Amino acid sequence: MNVEIERKFLVKNNNFKQESYNKTYIKQGYLNSDEKRVVRVRITDTEAFITIKGKSNKKGTTRFEWEKSISVLDAQQLLLLSEPTLIEKTRFYVKKGNHTYEIDEFLGDNLGLIVAEIELNSEDENFEKPTWLGKEVTGDLKYYNSRISKHPFKNWM
Amino acid sequence: MNVEIERKFLVKNNNFKQESYNKTYIKQGYLNSDEKRVVRVRITDTEAFITIKGKSNKKGTTRFEWEKSISVLDAQQLLLLSEPTLIEKTRFYVKKGNHTYEIDEFLGDNLGLIVAEIELNSEDENFEKPTWLGKEVTGDLKYYNSRISKHPFKNWM
């Protein structure tokens, strides 16, 4: 249970993949995608979680987050109850200074969408910006995964 | 993770209280009250849980249910995110034969509403019906706690 401080960016090209030290496949669905009380079920290569998020602050940088590890079997059952549609993506991890970028390359109906996130200790903390980092989209609801699950990237044009 | 088989009844009078071997205070709220994917946070006298329920079958007797114990502190934080309004009730436990009735005496905006539930091993299992047991309301959405949280008893008249 904590408050997360995160900033989110588009990604210009695939160069982040060479810099990545790890990656995992992620499948996730929502038991609620209301921004005031998001309930997310996520399965990765090896683990599963239920995560509950509150409403973001105005800038979209901070948000209450509560997460609990659950069994992959339970998560599979809970995904069956989730709202349409599930999100699938590959998450790449890139270390830059003291920070780790998580870069999500979306699959399926969201193919073509790539988003990078960085978690900070304070809202005004400095961080290294790699050349592949694009426009900041922090706080833009369109890029919330809970929103993407209802409005997939393929319908954005 | 299992499928619950339950039947629900109104209660005619307070005689169940003398037969009760235990009771607990319950406060609960909903992170989703959609009948297809209810997400409930509950705090009792001593414990807390997050519970996820799927859609009931047509008769309202069976329902997928997944429950996980969480800390009371976490539950208090999650109740702050819940939809209006929280439900408060006293739950009494009455043993009848091989079964246990759970009788909920609602408080606050639902004062006057008393509902008994019994969990069964199969849909056609026999069970003892005490004299205080009233009309069956199994499957009546009005008596779902998730519905009551949005449409409290005081507004039913």
Image: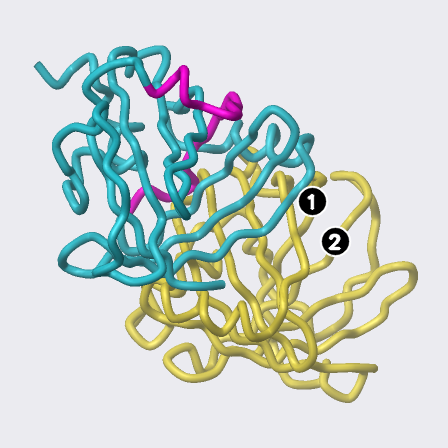
Chain colours: A yellow, B cyan
Front position in the image: A29 or B20: B20
> Is residue A4 highlighted in magenta?
no
Disc 1 marks a residue whose amino acid type is: Glu
Residue holding disc 1: A4
Span of residues in magenta: B16-34
- Mark 2 Cα shell of 10 Å, populated few (<14), some (14-19), many (≥20): some
Q: CA distance from mark 2 to mark 1?
A: 7 Å
Q: Is residue A121 left or right of residue A70?
A: right
Q: Check disc 2 and report its element: helix, strand or loop.
A: strand
Query: Image quadrant of residue B99?
Result: top left
Q: Is residue A95 left or right of residue A136?
A: right
Q: Which mark is residue A119?
A: 2
| Outermost residue, bottom side | A18
Q: Residue at position x 36%, y 26% from top?
A: B104
The answer to which of A3 and A97 lies nearer the viewer is: A3
Neighbour tally class for label 1: few under 14, some 14-19, many 20 plus, Cα within 10 Å: some
Extreme residue toward the front, this view = B97
The disc numbered 1 marks a residue on which chain?
Answer: A
- Give the left or right position of residue A20, taking residue A72 as reference: right
Judged left or right of residue B129, residue A59 is: right
Residue A116 in percent (x, y) is at 64, 66
Kindly identify the amino acid type of the residue bearing the numbered disc 2: Glu
Q: Which mark is residue B124?
A: none
Residue A113 higher or lower than A125, as above or below: below
Picture quarter containing residue B132? top left
| Disc 2 and disc 1 in contact, CB within 8 angstroms | yes
A2 relative to B94, above or below? below
Q: Position of residue B83 (x, y in %)?
A: 38, 31
Residue A147: % across, % down: 40, 57
